[in-house]
Image (spheres, rainbow, N blue to C red):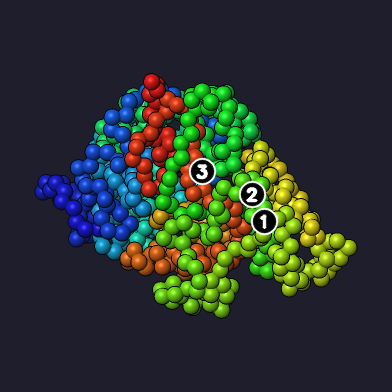
Amino acid sequence: MAPISFPKVTHAATVLALSFIGVSSHAEPGHGIAMYGDPALPQDFVSLPYANPEAPKGGRVVTGNGGSFDSLNPFVRKGTVPWQLRFFAYESLMGRNWDEPFALYGLLAESIETPEDRSWVEFTLREEARFSDGSPVTVADVIWSYETLGTVGHPRYLGFWQQVDSIKATGPRSVRITFNTDDRELALIAGLRPILKKAQFDGKSFEDTTLQEIPLGTAPYVVSDFEAGRFVTLSRDDNYWGADLPFRNGTHNFDEIKIDFFGDTSVMFEAFKAGEISYVREFNAEKWAAAYDFPLAQSGDVVKSEIPHEKPSGITGLVLNTRRAPLDDIRVRDALMHVFNFEFINDTMTGGRQPRITSFFSGSQLGMQDGPATGRVAELLAPFAADLPAEALEGYSLPQSDGSVRNRKNLRKAMSLMEAAGYSVVDGKMQNSAGEDLTLEILLTQGDTENKAIIDIYKKALEALGIDVAVTLVDGAQYKQRTGAFDFDITNYRRALSLSPGNEQRLYWGSDAAEQNGSRNFMGVQSPAIDAMITEMLTAGSQEDFIAATRALDRVLSTGRYVIPIWNYAVGRVAHDKNLHFPDTLPIYGDGVEWLPSVWWYEESK
């Protein structure tokens, strides 16, 4: 990043810093960092562009989760945790501006410093930074947090730690992390690791904490009450250390956030209709159009808001576990995609209102382009051409049906693909060359009514092709356990993707993650081409090279037929209590947990 002027340190402070580490640097400390170029907000920014500095504080908001929970430690593999907890109750050295593709600004840290090659990054802590118990955040806490999360923490933290060469104090409030990998994004990822209190776990096993042992955080909210499996209440900390930071100006306005748990999404919706929870996110356009005519909506006490965004579609649909035969055969996966009658399902489920996801990064400049690969994209894919589907270079589009229930053309194609893979139909059953019937298990969580409705239609089409289908419904804990062990053939899948994809791509579909229990590589893909494209993304020296690498990755993922995509959530849909308000200026990422409830506020409507 370009140098940014910063107050000079005294001679004594300089000597002290050099006593910790004897290597000088040409880098300059700054108030923020961007993946490419300079951060958009100046050093003297007043607030985030999508926050309202005049927002009133107060009020209470209640949100709903499906399933249950048995842990309040969101940083370990063990247990099921309210997913919102790590966003509401914990902070990192830097905070993200969701109105830029990927830019960070000082939070627990007052400055960040990194050289042009980003081979290391150094943070200086704010002197006033405090945990919720009032104790100061120290360099020792930072180092312990990185080491602990990187060795015994949740798998989401392990990959970063493996790319750290060293982490050392460079001063009483500064810490430097040196990397062993050429990866421009690591300096930013380092700024987003949660910081926990070392002393809280002295003599204790961090990964085996009980439900009552909630890690201390530094954030505006603390857990004030809970009942296992039923609710968690977070209260705004009146003594929150960072209340006057520009980064926090106009954010975290509610006095209380309560998370209620429901075993069934339909029950949760009924609770919303009765006014028991404050807002819901709606992902079904047909339901959005037809199901929000209940009394509170008719009276205006519930308001519907649509939130546009500029982010990629991500991938939502049914993931095929390639660790298991015959799903390791691309011809079988292609056949299953042809059997999936999206046009009929979309019309049945959403009234045809939602467009289909056409690739992992569709709807953005990062998505693959129509037709053959050209230019830098073609150059990146060329070394792997012999091992890729031809469509990766020649161009690809998803199967389309005529919208009728029969889907005859695509079923004929599916049968042809199955025959090429060594299957045939005998007495109405799809069998392999050994005469064994093909049976597939589809794993879903109980209460997942939308995906169950999709599967009910898909199941009939598969059975028409002679494939037996077992649909298994399990509770949330069992689902996490089974998907974490990759114990399924097919299951529902959602991976939201950003405008600046990076190291998380290795966890989603990197080869190493395929064999790491608990990873997000549900499909089990191990592809040198995918690994190489991710590396190209992470080492790209320009925005142009980065876009080319992402488009190439999109081609490999999409033509691999690893996920049967459904509809694109092209706009956020939030139904909410009329007394909940949000700023007129929206971030380019649209709706998300860092927007709702973070920048909303309570004010009684007149």
Q: Considering the numbered disc 1 on the image, is that residue within a helix, a strand or a loop?
A: loop
Q: Tell me the tag on residue 526.
A: none
Taking the spot 36% from the left edge, 42% from the top edge, the residue there is 586
Image position of 168 with respect to 559: above or below: above
Taking the spot 59% from the left edge, 31% from the top edge, the residue there is 269
Three-letter amino acid code of the residue under disc 1: Gly
Q: Residue furthest right?
A: 427
Three-letter amino acid code of the residue under disc 3: Val
Q: Which residue is identified by label 1? A: 403
Q: Which residue is identified by label 2? A: 347
Q: Residues within 10 Å of mark 2 (few under 14, many from 20)?
A: some
Q: Residues within 10 Å of mark 3 (few under 14, many from 20)?
A: many
Measured from the top left, where is residue 299 in percent x and y?
Answer: 51, 23
Give how far apart the Cα atoms at labels 3 and 1 are. Answer: 45 Å
Q: Considering the numbered disc 2 on the image, is that residue within a helix, a strand or a loop?
A: helix
Q: Residues within 10 Å of mark 1 (few under 14, many from 20)?
A: some
Q: Tell me the tag on residue 76.
A: 3
